[in-house]
Amino acid sequence: MFKALIIDDEKPVQIAVSKLGRWSYYGIEPPATAINGKDGLSCMRELHPDVVFVDMNMPVMDGCTFLEKAHHEFPDSQYIVISGYDEFHYAQQALRFGACDYLLKPIEENALNSAIEKALHRIDPDLVFGQNAAKTTNTSPEEVISIIKEFVESNYCTNIKISMFADKYFFSQEYLNKLFKNKYGYTIYEYVLKLRMERAKELLEQPDIKIMDIAERLGYADNHYFSKAFRTYYHVTPTQYRNQLQNP
């Protein structure tokens, strides 16, 4: 399946794009999100999305700067610009840095899905949409578990819900968790936590990254919740772990 990323500092816009996009119809996984261009670049390096929605006006790193950097580093990704400005120079800048479409806020469902379809056809002109949902009912339990593992490994920093797999593949959440644990030794949520904690240690080894930024990148609502999860998992707080690295 394809991957998508929404980069916008406005939560309502993230929600609108997430709800209005026909993701399963186009064979796209539920999109990940980022709150600014800098965060978006980090997510791209971890997720390698195929379709990227980016706002033009954001703090820390705006859309133009992001597009310039991202298009150079990820030339195969397709970029769809979202903007509240109906001005020619914004659209001109977006197209100059490789954007394939330009959408105005508020987001309209038809325009959004047309842009998605346009982006995917630029990736593969021979794509036929609407076939994925029919195929999922013929997927074996073993294949489903492998698909879930791959999805988790690419999206562990997002809010993963087992119910979306249960609804898609027509298996109960309990059954999927049982199969996953039998094959990999962890329940799905335990595996998500394992990946997050391993990534957390890697990020804590970089002293220039703030702990609150690490928490956000790994999908935690706040620093306190992240610190509690880290302490429970490793029996040491993130700050203590970082201090141990700096003062062995």
Image: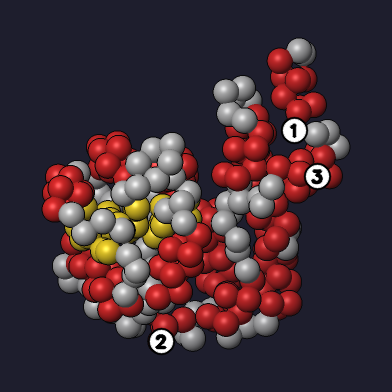
Residue 8 point in image, percent of width and height: 42, 53
CB under 8 Å between discs 1 and 3: no
Q: Residue at x 62, y 30 (%)?
A: 210
Q: Is residue 81 left or right of residue 161?
A: left
> Residue 119 versus residue 68: which sits nearer the camera?
68
Can you see residue 131?
yes
Q: Judge the density around disc 2: few (<14), some (14-19), many (≥20) Cα neighbours within 10 Å.
A: few
Where 64 sits versus 248, above or below? below
Q: Identify the amino acid type marked 2.
A: Ala
**Residue picked out by circle 3:** 228
Q: Judge the density around disc 3: few (<14), some (14-19), many (≥20) Cα neighbours within 10 Å.
A: some
Where 23 sits versus 65, above or below? below
Residue 237 position by quadrant: top right
Residue 128 point in image, percent of width and height: 24, 78
Tell me the mark number nearer the camera, choosing from 2 and 1: 1
Residue 22 point in image, percent of width and height: 38, 77
Spatial distance from mark 2 to mark 1, Cα to Cα? 45 Å
Of the numbered discs 2 and 3, the one sitting upstream in the chain is: 2
Label 2 element class:
helix
**Residue picked out by circle 1:** 238
Label 1 element class:
helix
Q: Is residue 158 left or right of residue 22?
A: right
How many badges with numbers are in the image? 3
Of the numbered discs 2 and 1, the one sitting upstream in the chain is: 2
Tell me the mark number nearer the camera, choosing from 2 and 3: 3
Spatial distance from mark 2 to mark 3, Cα to Cα? 42 Å
CB under 8 Å between discs 2 and 3: no
> Residue 247 versus residue 141: which sits nearer the camera?
247
Q: Residue at x 20, y 49 (%)?
A: 90
Q: Identify the amino acid type marked 1.
A: Pro
The mark found on residue 97 in the picture is none
**Residue picked out by circle 2:** 134
